[in-house]
Amino acid sequence: MSFTTLDAAASNSAAPVANALCPTGSGHLGLLCVTEPLDLNGAEQLAERIQRLSLNCRCVVLDLSAAEFLDSDGVRALLRLSRELQTANRELRLVLQPGSPVERIFNLLRLGQCLRAYASLEEARAGQVRPS
């Protein structure tokens, strides 16, 4: 699975850099972009990356807008990661490309009831509520 780590403070273009932390009003915001399907093969790697990233930030933004697919293993991983982060007083925010297969799965499974999703990286960074 391929991941790109982004530094939100580096530029508006969100160029890939080594670390994914930027200061926010309530701590740090970590950004991670998934560029391949989130399935059995990638779910475990994703969990490891998010757990490492969340050690130094209060909020993890997971950009799934370039992900081609999300299967049941990916859904389980997202739900588990969200619960783990909440237990540690941290937050998981997802970026979903409107109209994408990943967004359709997200909506079909009504994951919006337990996961926070945003239509753009900018909205997720700001914590703006996604229109229903």
Image (spheres, rainbow, N blue to C red):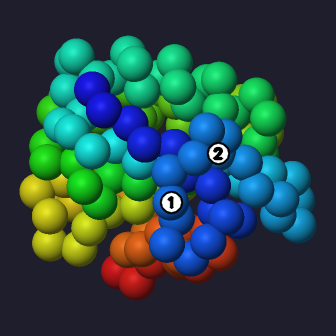
Quarter of the image where the C terminus is located: bottom left
Q: Judge whether 91 appears above or below 45 on screen.
A: below
Q: Amino acid at mark 1?
A: Ala
Q: Residue at x 72, y 48 (%)?
A: 21
Residue where numbered disc 2 is placed: 20
Q: Nearer the viewer, residue 42 or 99?
A: 42
Q: State the CA–CA distance, disc 1 to disc 2.
A: 11 Å
Q: Is residue 51 visible?
A: yes
Task: Identify the residue position indicated by label 1 in the image.
Answer: 15
User: Residue sitting at 22 percent across and 60 percent down?
Assistant: 103
Pointer 2 local density, CA inside 10 Å: few below 14, some 14–19, many at least 20: many
Quick check: 124 above or below 53?
Answer: below
Query: Which of disc 2 and disc 1 is earlier in sequence?
Result: 1
Q: Where residue 12 appears, x then y in whole percent?
A: 56, 76
Position of 40 with respect to 20 (left or right) is left
Q: Nearer the viewer, residue 113 or 103?
A: 103
Most extreme residue toward the bottom, as rendered? Answer: 131
Q: Tell me residue 110's x, y (percent).
A: 28, 55
User: For the residue carrying disc 1, how many other residues have a C-alpha within 10 Å: few (<14), some (14-19), or many (20+)?
Assistant: few
| In the depicted structure, whether residue 109 falls above or below residue 124 | above
The amino acid marked with disc number 2 is Ala
Classify mark 1: helix, strand or loop.
Answer: loop
- Residue 53: percent from left, percent from top: 65, 32
Residue under the point 87% across and 53% down: 27
